[in-house]
C-alpha cells in the first residue's frame, strides 16, 4: 500500500500561534507540559502536585468534559483561583473561539458559552498575553483599512 508522511504541528502550537500567545516566556513560564486530560478509561488521574506549579504552561488535550475536575484539582494542589486559563475551541480554524477565564470560573464560562470539543485548555500566566495580541491585531487591521482607503 503506498503511503507518505504529511508533517504537521501540534494543536498547542497552532492554537498558540492563532491566539498570538507564547507557550513559554522568560520569567513567566519556563516549562511547557502537554497533558492528555483523560486516559483511555476516561480517568482524570494526574500528578496534580507537579502540575499545580507556577512557572509553567499546561496544555490539556481532550479535556472539555473534565474541565471542572482539572480546575478543582489544580486549585486544591496549590494554584490560586484567579490563575489564568484560556479555552480555545476549534483552534486555528475559521470557527475558532477563545475565552480567557480563571481556574475558578472556567467551567461555568465554558457552559455559558456552550463551548464544544475540540477545545484546548491552556493554563498559565501566558494566557493573559492573548488580550494584548488581540488588541495588536485589531490595531493592525484598522491601520491596514486606513492605508487601503
Image (cartoon, rainbow, N blue to C red):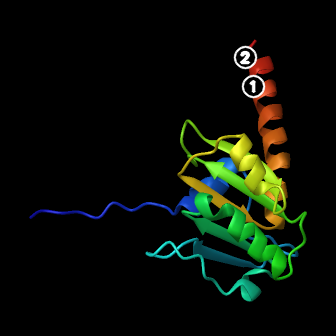
Q: In this view, does 92 lie to the left or right of 23?
A: left
**Of 135 and 120, the residue lying toward us:** 120
Which of the 4 quarters of the picture holds residue 4? Answer: bottom left
x and y, in percent, of residue 109 in the image: 76, 47
Q: Can residue 15 be seen in this view?
A: yes
Q: Which residue lies furthest to the top in this view?
A: 149
The residue at the point 73 percent across, 41 percent down is 112
In the picture of the structure, the residue carrying the numbered disc 1 is 144
Check contact, mark 1 vs mark 2: CB within 8 A: yes
Q: Which of 83 and 96 is in front in this view?
A: 83
**Helix, strand or loop under label 2:** helix
Q: Give the answer, above or below, for where 128 lies relative to 139.
A: below
Q: In this view, does 63 lie to the left or right of 111?
A: left
Residue under the image location 59 percent in, 76 percent down: 44
Residue in the picture at 61% in, 58% down: 64
Q: Residues within 10 Å of mark 1 (few under 14, many from 20)?
A: few
* Residue toward you, 17 or 98: 98
Residue under numbered circle 2? 148
Above or below for 97 versus 11: above
Residue 75 screen position, x and y as percent: 83, 74
Amino acid at each position: 500500500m503506498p503511503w507518505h508522511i504529511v508533517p504537521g504541528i501540534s494543536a498547542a502550537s497552532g492554537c498558540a500561534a492563532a491566539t498570538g500567545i507564547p507557550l513559554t516566556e522568560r520569567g513567566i513560564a519556563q516549562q511547557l507540559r502537554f497533558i492528555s486530560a483523560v486516559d483511555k478509561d476516561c480517568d482524570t488521574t494526574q500528578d496534580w502536585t507537579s502540575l499545580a506549579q507556577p512557572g509553567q504552561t499546561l496544555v490539556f488535550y481532550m479535556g472539555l468534559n473534565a474541565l471542572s475536575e482539572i480546575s478543582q484539582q489544580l486549585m486544591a494542589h496549590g494554584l490560586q483561583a484567579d490563575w489564568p486559563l484560556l479555552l480555545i475551541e476549534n483552534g486555528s480554524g475559521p470557527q475558532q473561539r477563545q475565552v480567557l477565564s480563571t481556574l475558578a470560573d472556567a467551567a461555568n464560562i465554558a457552559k455559558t458559552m456552550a463551548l464544544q470539543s475540540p477545545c484546548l485548555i491552556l493554563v498559565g500566566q501566558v494566557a493573559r498575553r492573548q488580550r494584548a495580541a488581540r488588541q495588536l491585531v485589531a490595531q493592525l487591521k484598522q491601520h491596514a483599512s486606513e492605508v487601503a482607503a
